[in-house]
Amino acid sequence: MNTHSFEHELKQLAAPPPDPAARERARRAALEEFQRRPGTVHQLHSPRRWRPLGPWSSGLAAASIAAVGVAVYWLLPPEERVLAIGEPATSPSVPTYTELKHDEPEPPQSSTARAERSAITTAPPPPKMELPAVETPPPVMDIMIPQESLPASAISNATDRTRPAVAPAPPPPPLQASTRALEEVQVTGSRRVSREFDSPMAVTTIIADTLESENRDKFQHFDVNPVKRAAEEPVSTFSADVDTASYSYVRRQLDDGVLPPADAVRVEEMVNYFDYAWPAPASRSAPFQPTITVSDSPWGTGKKLVHIGIRGFDLPAARRPDVNLVLLLDVSGSMNSPDKLPLAQRSMALLLDSLKPTDTVAIVVYAGAAGQVLAPTPVREKQAILDALGSLRPGGSTAGAAGIQLAYELAGRSFRKDGVNRILLATDGDFNVGITDREALKSLVERERDKGVFLSVLGFGQGNYRDEMAQTLAQNGNGVAAYIDTLNEARKVLVEQASAALFTIAKDVKLQVEFNPATVAEYRLVGYESRGLNREDFNNDQVDAGDIGAGHVVTAIYEITPAGSSAQLIDERRYATGTDAPPRGRVAPGEYGYLRIRYKLPDSTRSRLIESPIRTRASVPAALRQDVQFSTAVAGFAQLLRGGRYTGGLSFEDVLREAQASRGEDPYGYRAEFVQLVRRAMQARGIQ
């Protein structure tokens, strides 16, 4: 019986149930047999009478080895039928083979690491090749296989990003004693092997990594605000926004060596990530006052930028009310990653240092179901809170709505009438059990918001991040949405800016600008696309808007084209009459427009109004010059990342130069970090 017929008969046999003990014994026997084999069959030293049987004995040994190898192969479960080169045997010229253990954890692979390796994104199945033996192994190369090249079973079963399904491999070809080179490499799926090993042969590892390289993060799509004619649409209305999630997500992508998705870039959140020296109000009764500056646009000759800056009143530590805080932590299987649940646990531990001993903390978790881990506990019992945090482990599906409902129930039972009642949700945003519809969750959050319990959202991780869900919950829960990519970002949000995250000083903050068609031909709001409001919403106190926390800084930028400028993008209407025609003498010629701000105090249901003209002679005070220039650089950078539709000839080099010149005082190094992000974006775009 030859080797091929032997293999054919083995294939017809039904594989017996896996027996771990038998499998281990067979594996060890195969390894011992391999190690006993001599380096070269032509150097056998045996008595002369056995020499005529040398070829028969060699063939018998080869057949025995093949039989043992095939038997070991079929004893293994399909997902473990993978051979890898192991440690060399006693003879340096003979490789040994050992079994890969698939239950070992895989270290996260950044996009930078994958980009630094040679990647072939479209290639036919590799031809048979012989790899010569070398003294030292070369670097291992990953070859990216496109998804359409994978077996159908490997694609349909790969539902878990961290553990994609592996298609069963065909039986390996029989080993021949005279062959020392690897004849062929089979692609068995998208599993990434984390073990490193030495081999006396040159080895090329082929990994179908398309499923892991997909970016499955989801963001709400929006179009960039268009240019509008002041004579036709003179009024612009939008909600305040203090979120910063976009900036930290963009930073993570650039740190990984890739450009972020366009919809992940929200200009206002990029700009508002930084602190600016807008003047602070003197009293909580008037929680903020606007600062308006007018400067030339760096990306549009003949155009100007109008900065509107707001700084919220910062509560002294002695005047901060007590906090009733419920930590709602996602512990589902999708959070099983070092940058998700473990980072969330460490972030919550940092938050405890920002609270008073009399504040209370409760912990609710959710996976396939929701449960209470810790009843409301005073912060002075810090160790009990830390122990509860440290006991959490990920697993199961994501019943996010059930967790939110339970958190609201717990917050309601420990409600503080004169204090702050807030839920802090830490999640990757993937809700797949229970209420999964955004509108239904929005209604739930709105009802509880009206009862005085607010909701903030901290996003974690990538590959499964649902930004649109985090934005919906935070915006309608009178909270903030932040993205935590590092422990330093957690420290910034939960320690340095803890007052802003916890203590609301003004709610439903709306801004409205009416432009003067006599002095402004065109205008464009830079960013805030997802925060636009109807004109009639401004005076309607039933319409929800953004909230501002203690010490929060909000910056909005308009690009305007003065009347008569050659930089106009929209031609004048030939038949403009009546209300379409630019007014004459109806508005003071010394004003570009008029700013109105509406807001409510935290315990009020009626809004207050702040008004201020935008004067044509307004300039940039010396004390604010660096802040205006730096915020302009950030706005330009964000627009370039989105495609630069209205940035003219602005380049990344221009942004870099402007940011470096306006760093100013930078106690935490955030502005220096931004300069490095611009450089990384240039590298990702292939700009040297």
Image (cartoon, rainbow, N blue to C red):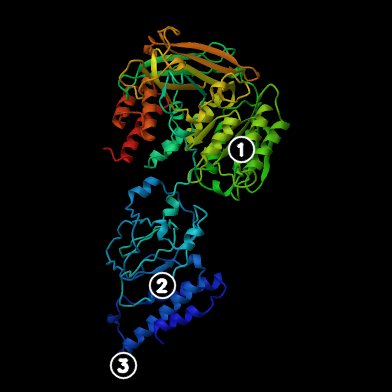
Q: Reading the chain from its start, which is encountered first: label 1 or label 2?
A: 2
Of discs 2 and 3, which sits in the foreground?
2
- Label 2, residues with CA under 10 Å away: few <14, some 14-19, many ≥20: some
Query: Observer-nearest residue: 566 or 478?
Result: 566
Q: Which residue bears the numbered disc 2?
A: 172
Image quarter hosting the C terminus: top left
Q: Amino acid at mark 3?
A: Arg
Q: Give the residue pinned by disc 3.
A: 49
Q: Nearer the viewer, residue 161 or 315?
A: 161
Position of the N terminus, as image quadrant, is bottom left
SS at badge 3: helix
- Please indicate whether residue 660 sits to the left or right of residue 368 in the image: left
Mark 2–mark 3 distance (CA, rounded to whole Å): 35 Å
| Residue that carries the numbered disc 1 in the rendered image | 439
Res 378 visible: no
Dot 1 crowding, Cα within 10 Å, few <14, some 14–19, many 20+:
few
Q: Residues within 10 Å of mark 3 (few under 14, many from 20)?
A: few
Pointer 2 with pointer 3, Cβ within 8 A:
no
| Residue 444 image point, x, y percent | 66, 35
Badge 2 marks a residue whose secondary structure is: loop
